[in-house]
Image (cartoon, rainbow, N blue to C red):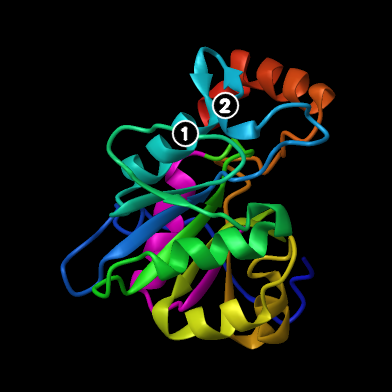
Amino acid sequence: MSHRGFRGVGPPGPALAVGWRTVANQVAGVLLAAGEGKRLGTPKALVELGGRRLVDRGADMLRESGTAPVLVVTGAVPVTVPGVTLVPNPDWRTGMGSSLAAGLRALPADCAAAVIALVDQPLIGPDVVRRLLAAHRAGAELAVAAYDGRARNPVLLARGHWAGVLAAAEGDAGARPYLRAHPGMVTLVECGDIGRPDDVDTPEDLARVGALLAGPAGSLG
């Protein structure tokens, strides 16, 4: 995703890095975990790295960051995850856009914003989400995690933008079309010092990311 025109912020100080939540500014966490993992050969949600399923890693990341409630959007296979709300997406075959829609539409009315994360990026940890929350607290309505200046995931979407995001989402694009159409409203939050956006799309990706988690970079996940 191009970041031309996006506003950027660097790593926050300690005070801004702390997760926050009140009834008035509640930020939910939504983990998209509905795909069948065609190139990987198995649904990504159930893949294990270091003895933990990717879906558990993603749900724990959102919980530990301070988002609430945490929703997990499922589809290709039944998934049980303690302590979260499961949202089945019967249209998961159409792509990420339908899962994003299912997650946002299932959120309670008192949520001011939502952090959207993907199940196949285990090198992203709760500190990344905390930076998005800090940016939102400082006034950002559309906050996107960036790595070396490049916009990736997760993303934070304030409620006022949900209708526009859903109207623009189709196929596997998710929130990207809306963010690209409103670059002046997007705040890039640099997270390259605390995480990596590596996707687990193929068996080779799985082996590589597994090696990173087992090594010194494992602390990023």
Q: Secondary structure at mark 1?
A: loop
Q: Dots 2 and 1: beta carbons under 8 Å?
A: yes
Taking the spot 27% from the left edge, 75% from the top edge, the residue there is 109
Which x, y percent locates residue 115? 45, 60
Looking at the rendered structure, the kind of residue marked 1 is: Val
Classify mark 2: residues with Cα within 10 Å, few (<14), some (14-19) or many (20+): some
- Name the residue nearer the viewer: 16 or 105: 105
Magenta span covers which residues? 125-145
Q: Is residue 109 above or below residue 52?
A: below
Which x, y percent locates residue 70? 35, 50
Was residue 208 drawn as part of the magenta stretch in this picture?
Answer: no
110 left or right, relative to 131:
left
Q: Is residue 46 above or below residue 150?
A: above
User: Does the rendering let one see residue 14?
Assistant: no
List the residue tagged with mark 2. 46
58 left or right, relative to 66:
right
Taking the spot 46% from the left edge, 61% from the top edge, the residue there is 103
Q: Quadrant of residue 151?
A: bottom right
List the residue tagged with mark 1. 79
Give the spatial CA distance, label 2 vs label 1.
8 Å
The image quadrant where one finds the N terminus is: bottom right
Which x, y percent locates residue 88? 48, 50
Taking the spot 71% from the left edge, 71% from the top edge, the residue there is 170
133 left or right, relative to 94:
left
Q: Nearer the viewer, mark 2 or mark 1?
A: 1
Q: Is residue 176 above or below residue 95?
A: below
Q: Secondary structure at mark 2?
A: helix
Q: Quadrant of residue 49?
A: top right
